[in-house]
Structures are given as structure tokens and as C-alpha cells.
Image: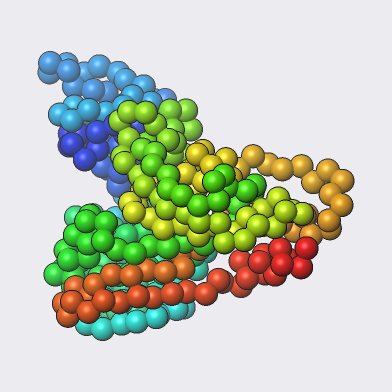
């Protein structure tokens, strides 16, 4: 069985294995297995030609999967799954919640555990907006799996379109609390650095000189804990790129997030004089929390602003820092 996939403008620059996994609604591991078995080819002048998985796709290119059907992510992936949700606000058009760390927002390549979408489908009895991606009903924006905080969900298509436009216009207030290693210099300011896929580690983003998406972060240092070499920084996003705060703090300010497995080098415990240092080094996720979300209600036009206190794990981290 063969399946042909054509690259659209919105997918330009993606790795070929990533593009095919998303286009076929399957896992990247399965696509990489097909590469090893010579099951992927490119159609050039009507003739198939092999390409590496790392090839960056261009609009108009066509690729063939020569084995199938692949294990689909869409089959049985959107069955409602009851789960506890921390609802902050709800009406007929939108729902605002406090997302816990450890919860993936929506199904995707390689995701097999129940996601926030599954819980939302159960809670709303399926009353969610329909997006261009059938695996993302109601989802207007995302938070990384290990990032906690405020998230708005659309229940109607009209609300979805309106909120999506507000995000596109960068008129939505998004403010994050971050705990990072080091002391930002200067202590407050703005970061402008286009973000794109890391040239070697495809799961990472990087500040790139060309081909990326413009990214703009305002930041201010809220408090410094000099004995532990950590700062609490508040970031306001003017754009919303993947891993934006994580990359800007680590790559531009050289202040990576506490607990970030992707962008923070593993720190040796050594002979730390402060016993609390061990607890901080072992913090199990990136210390990042979406604390404020502000936007205009898509139907009433009323300005709305929601704030989430630090979750228990970050509150404990702050307590450790304050006691040092």
C-alpha cells in the first residue's frame, strides 16, 4: 500500500520524518522504521528517489510511504477520558483552566497517554470547537507537558476563530514565572531572537540567524538567591513560540531553567555546602508556570484576566529558596 503526502507552505523547513509523522497521524518511531526499511521515497519528475530522515522539506515536494497502513493516531485517540480538571472559568463559549505539570495538551506523534483533550471531551460532553487539526478540538494555544498554568479552551467555532486572531495579533497577555540558574544581565529587558528547529537535536528549539520565527520576550528579575545561584524571573511573552521562554533564558541570558532536561546541563552535586542544593538539582521538571493570561472575551468583548498561584511543587521550590 502506498500513500502520498504533499508539503504545504505551513510545513516548510520541518524534518522529513517529523512532517510524515504529522501528515500520516502516526509516530515518528514508525516513520523512522520505514526509513530503515527503504519505505520512504521522494517523487522527483515522476520518479521515486530516496532522501534522509533529516531532509528539510520544501513546499510542493511529494513523498511516498511504501508500507501501510501506519498505526493511526486518530483511531480511538479521541475517546473521552474522565479526569480531574481545575476549572477557573466557564461559559457557553470558552473554558479557562489551570493545567497541571505532566499533562500533554493534545494527542500527537508518539503520545499514547490520555491528554488534556481527552479529559475536556469527557467534561464538556464533546462540546468543543473544531480546529484544522482533528486531534486538537478546542485547543487554541498550548503549554509544554511539564509547564503548569493558565490555559483557555474554545467551546464554539466562533470563539476559536476570535481567540486565534487575538493570539495572532499578539494582543493576549501571557506572563510566566520562571526559576533559573544564574543572574540575568541586565536584570530586566527584552529578548528578540528568532526560533527554529535545532540543527542537530530535532526535539529542541534554537535561536537561529535565518529561517526561524520571530520571538519576543520581556523579562524582569523578581528576586535573586545568591547562595544557591538561582533567580526568580517573570517573563511576558509578546509572541508564543515553542519553548520560547526556555530557549530565550538559556541561550540569550545564559540562565537556563531549574529542572529543564533539554536546555540545562546536568549539574554536579559536588560537595555543596548548602544541603538544600541537592533538592533543587533534583527538581523533576522545568520550573516554569504560566501565571497570568489576559484576553478579550470572544463574544461579549469583556476584558478578562486570570491568575494562577504557584502549584505545590514550585511553591515548595520557592520555600526552599527562601529558607536558604
Q: Quadrant of the N terminus?
A: top left
The image position of residue 208, as x and y in percent, is 39, 31
Whether residue 60 is situated above or below residue 106 in the rendered picture: above
Name the residue at 55% across, 56% down.
221
Name the residue at 76% across, 42% down.
268
The image position of residue 302, as x and y in percent, is 22, 79
Name the residue at 47% across, 54% down.
219
Whether residue 25 is situated above or below residue 3 in the rendered picture: below
Give the image quarter of residue 317: bottom right
The reply to whether residue 77 is in sight is no
Question: Which one is nearer the viewer's eye here, 69 or 226?
Answer: 226
- Judged left or right of residue 315, residue 15 is left
The image position of residue 272, as x and y in percent, is 84, 49
Question: Which one is nearer the viewer's eye here, 311 or 119?
Answer: 311
- Judged left or right of residue 167, residue 203 is right
The image position of residue 115, as x and y in percent, is 41, 63
Amino acid at each position: 500500500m502506498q500513500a502520498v503526502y504533499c508539503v504545504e507552505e505551513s510545513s516548510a523547513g520541518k524534518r522529513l520524518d517529523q512532517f510524515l509523522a504529522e501528515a500520516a497521524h502516526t509516530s515518528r518511531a514508525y516513520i523512522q522504521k520505514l526509513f530503515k526499511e527503504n519505505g520512504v521515497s521522494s517523487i522527483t519528475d515522476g520518479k521515486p528517489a530516496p532522501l534522509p530522515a533529516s531532509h528539510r522539506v520544501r513546499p510542493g515536494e511529494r513523498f511516498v510511504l511504501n508500507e501501510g497502513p501506519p498505526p493511526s493516531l486518530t483511531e480511538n485517540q479521541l475517546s473521552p477520558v474522565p479526569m480531574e480538571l481545575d476549572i477557573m472559568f466557564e461559559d457557553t463559549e470558552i473554558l479557562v483552566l489551570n493545567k497541571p505539570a505532566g499533562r500533554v495538551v493534545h494527542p500527537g506523534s508518539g503520545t499514547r497517554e490520555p491528554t488534556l483533550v481527552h479529559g475536556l471531551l469527557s467534561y464538556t460532553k464533546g462540546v468543543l470547537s473544531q480546529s484544522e487539526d482533528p486531534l486538537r478540538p478546542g485547543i487554541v494555544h498550548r503549554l509544554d507537558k511539564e509547564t503548569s498554568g493558565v490555559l483557555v479552551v474554545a467551546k464554539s467555532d466562533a470563539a476559536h476563530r476570535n481567540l486565534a486572531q487575538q493570539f495572532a495579533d499578539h494582543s493576549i497577555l501571557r506572563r510566566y514565572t520562571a526559576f533559573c540558574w544564574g543572574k540575568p544581565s541586565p536584570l530586566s529587558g527584552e529578548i528578540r531572537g528568532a526560533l527554529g528547529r535545532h540543527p542537530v537535536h530535532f526535539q529542541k528549539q534554537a535561536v537561529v540567524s535565518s529561517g526561524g520565527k520571530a520571538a519576543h520576550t520581556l523579562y524582569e528579575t523578581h528576586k535573586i538567591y545568591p547562595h544557591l545561584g538561582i533567580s526568580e524571573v517573570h517573563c511576558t511573552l509578546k509572541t508564543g513560540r515553542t519553548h520560547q521562554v526556555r530557549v530565550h533564558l538559556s541561550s540569550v541570558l545564559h540562565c537556563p531553567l531549574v529542572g529543564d532536561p533539554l536546555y540545562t546541563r546536568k549539574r554536579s552535586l559536588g560537595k555543596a555546602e548548602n544541603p538544600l542544593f541537592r533538592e533543587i538539582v533534583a527538581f523533576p521538571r522545568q520550573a516554569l508556570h504560566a501565571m497570568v493570561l489576559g484576553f478579550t472575551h470572544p463574544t461579549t468583548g469583556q476584558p478578562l484576566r486570570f491568575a494562577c498561584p504557584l502549584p505545590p511543587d514550585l511553591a515548595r521550590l520557592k520555600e526552599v529558596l527562601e529558607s536558604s
